[in-house]
Amino acid sequence: MKRIYEPAAYGPQGACWWSQTVAPLDWPALQGDKPTGIAIIGGGFTGLSAALHLAQDGAEVTLLEAEHPGFGASGRNGGFCCLGGAKATARQLRHQVGAEGLRDWRQTEKSAVATAARLIAEHDIDADTHSDGETMIAHSPRAFARLRASAPGIEQDYGVTPRLIEMEDMAAEGFGGPFFGALTTPIGFALNPRKYHAGLARAAQNAGAALHGHSPVTALHRNGKWRLTTPQGTVTADRVVLATNGYSSEDLPDWLRARYLPVQSSVIVTEPVPDDLRQAQGWTSHQMAYDTRVLLHYFRMMPDGRFLFGMRGGLSATPVAQRRIARAIRDDFAEMFPRWRNVGITHEWAGLVCLMANLVPFVGEVPDHPGLFAGLGFHGNGVAMGSHAGMLLAGLVQGKPAQPAIPAAMSLIPGRFLLGRHRRKLLVAPYVAASLLDL
């Protein structure tokens, strides 16, 4: 594999709380040579959703995961099933795909949340769901003014009425802290991502999909059929789905080189916060929330009373960089929730989200690679959009009319980032600028 981060970025980075909430899964490694109809590379939400929907249609499916189940971002994320999936602004989307394309993308965001909710309901997945939509917290008076101005657009784009919370009402709403107001959009919910992942895996296996762990694809070639090589076996397939997102490799296939940019996201989880400290801080809400900073923080009280707090900002996985992020996330947590500065932090980890050069996900057939399809680039919102992309890929691979249709924004062929393997450097200046704007 050819990856652009230090090896530590692709290995275990601290104890992940979610892994302690489910019985360990251990899909068997692929052994020997295996023919299949459709091979899927990647066992996260996108790959499992594709495997499940394909198997339900009667297709022969073999999924290959490089590590243990839930190893990547699907097992490490903050558990926000919400609107999003792109970083492109409305103006950028309108320029790329027109007004109709922008409307279709907004509908796709809603549909993605509905897809995840449907999968949970249909397959009886106990994923500890909670939160009525998502709440965006203003970190400055200017940011709250922007939230106020955005409310009519949210109603127009998504057909729901957002609720604006003034600064003086924040404490009564359970959002106590150094904040300047908030806006709640009633779409989405929080969940335990590892429980959701395990439920999707169980459903896919019950539908007939073969799931293999500890089976990294080290080579991918086509000679009539696709041949996927792993350390202990090979798979021969008519069609292949690439669902590796931020954990992709530059040479699987070569077309993917420099078309995606992994970015680190870090998370801490506290011990259960006592009721008296919740009241003292004034944060008693179970809403999933994030702030208005460019390098945002995301946070929520979980059903068992633990508090999850995450942030963007890591561009390196060296020991020095990891220590710097560990200090930064603790400092930011203490600044935003000062009454909890002495609450114990029991878990800390990181994972990779995936950016694309045009700032929108890609779902489609890989150009000049007949029978090879890809779904990636969810910009830190892969719980809903990855699940939805897997469903879209299942229809696309089978040549079925897409229901719902794949929006034009997701069909754009992603361009390449400048600087090739060194493209992380492109984010240094924007990150410095963002840190200044976020003050």
Image (cartoon, rainbow, N blue to C red):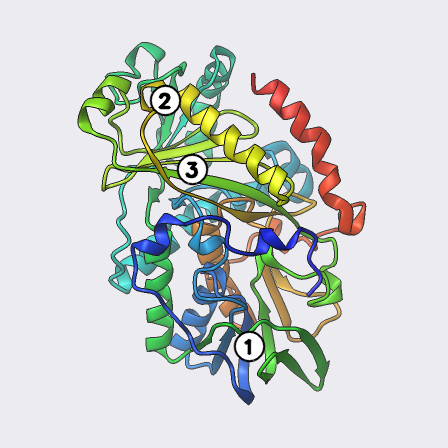
Type of the residue with mark 2: Phe
Q: Is residue 225 left or right of residue 294?
A: right
Q: Quadrant of residue 95?
A: top right
**Mark 2 vs mark 3: in front:** 2
Please tell me how many numbered marks the rendered image carries: 3
Q: Nearer the viewer, residue 105 or 127?
A: 127
Q: Is residue 231 left or right of residue 341?
A: right
Q: Would you place residue 364 above or below residue 354 in this image?
A: below
Label drawn at residue 39? 1
Quadrant in which the N terminus appears:
bottom right
Count residues near mark 2 (Cα–Cα under 10 Å), then give few for <14, some for 14-19, many for 20+.
some
Label drawn at residue 337? 2
Q: Quadrant of residue 339?
A: top left
Mark 2 vs mark 3, CA separation in Å = 32 Å
Q: Nearer the viewer, residue 32 or 82?
A: 32
Mark 1 vs mark 3, CA separation in Å = 35 Å
Residue for badge 3: 158
